Amino acid sequence: MDSPVDIAEFKDRDLHILELLADHVVHGKKCPAIFKNDGIETLWIGKYPFLVLAYQEKIINIFCRNFYEVAPTVLNKNDGTQEKISPYCCINSEAIAKTSNFNGDVTMESIKEHPYSPSVGEWYVKLLLEAITAMDDAPDNNKTVKFSNDLANYLLENEDTVVNRINKLQVNKRFAPLEKQHTDWLLAERDREDDPRLLCGIAILLEDTVLFDEQFAKLTPDIQEEFRAYPIMKLLDVKPIPS
């Protein structure tokens, strides 16, 4: 939501909870026992949804710097070590598109706090797909558009893979036709790639429905179902989002 929150709509209880969510007072503040259990919850303040962490009778705005100082870890598949990762790695498209306190800049700061590795990158690719889905669900929300671009650029800068290039191009294609240099790369990759999933993505970006149908038929039923949920599938039958 890009429009300002209208505090004139709030009741006294709403204003009190909103104060607790502010960055400069949030850490350690106690709040009414709103939630029965600890965890990530959606807190409604007036008509506005906020994503918060409920913890020991406290509520913490999860898109503030106090929250992302504590980072979970993931397993490095190469050497078995644990690597720190942003706690935002598991937020979903609904949280990105609809919560009033989503902050893409804070999320990117958190992501950049920790060293990049392919194991960490896999999680951020999933986050990017959620962000792109959020962008499709709320095309007029500038925050989701900027975050999708920022995360796609970050992934490509740290790991120049076919997957990361395809994801960056699917973000671009939502707003304008692809540039010739990108189309040339896709055509070259089409001729040297042998992974049907990647070829499906390439076919969609090239608007080559024959190639897509051919490669999609090679996928197992389970992979087909998984692929249908990818946001790139929406490019098969939608026009670019107006800029």
Image (spheres, rainbow, N blue to C red):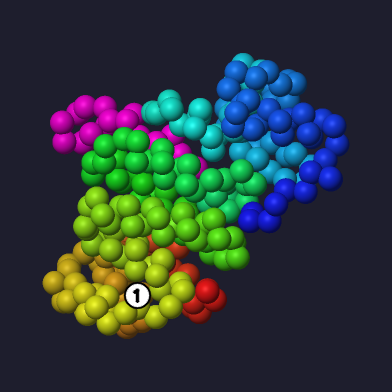
183 on left or right of 152:
left
Q: Is residue 99 magenta?
A: no
Residue 217 visible in image: no
Which of the 4 quarters of the picture holds residue 71? top left
Name the one closer to the observer, 138 or 204. Answer: 138
| Residue ID at (54%, 76%) | 242
Residue plotted at (46% across, 74% down): 175
Name above or below for residue 88 compared with residue 66. Answer: below
Pinpoint residue 133: horizontal percent, then vertical percent. Answer: 50, 59
Q: Residues in magenta?
A: 73-91
Left or right: 203 in relation to 49? left
**Helix or strand or loop: what does disc 1 sit on?**
helix
Residue 39 x/y as whole percent:
57, 27
Which of the pair 163/11 is nearer the observer?
11
Image: 206 above or below 83 = below
Residue sitting at x 35%, y 78%: 178
Q: Position of residue 18 (x, y in %)?
A: 72, 34
Numbered marks: total: 1
The quadrant holding residue 185 is: bottom left
Residue 77 is one of the magenta-drawn residues: yes
Q: Is residue 82 visible?
A: yes
Judged from this view, the residue extending furthest toward the front is 24
Label 1 CA crowd tier, 10 Å (few <14, some 14–19, many 20+): many
Q: For the N terminus, which image quadrant?
A: bottom right
Q: Is residue 194 left or right of residue 68?
A: left
Tell me residue 4's x, y (percent): 70, 52
The answer to which image quadrant residue 46 occupies is top right
Which residue does the numbered mark 1 point to in the structure image?
Answer: 205
Residue at x 46% of width, y 31% of height: 68
- Which amino acid is tagged 1? Leu
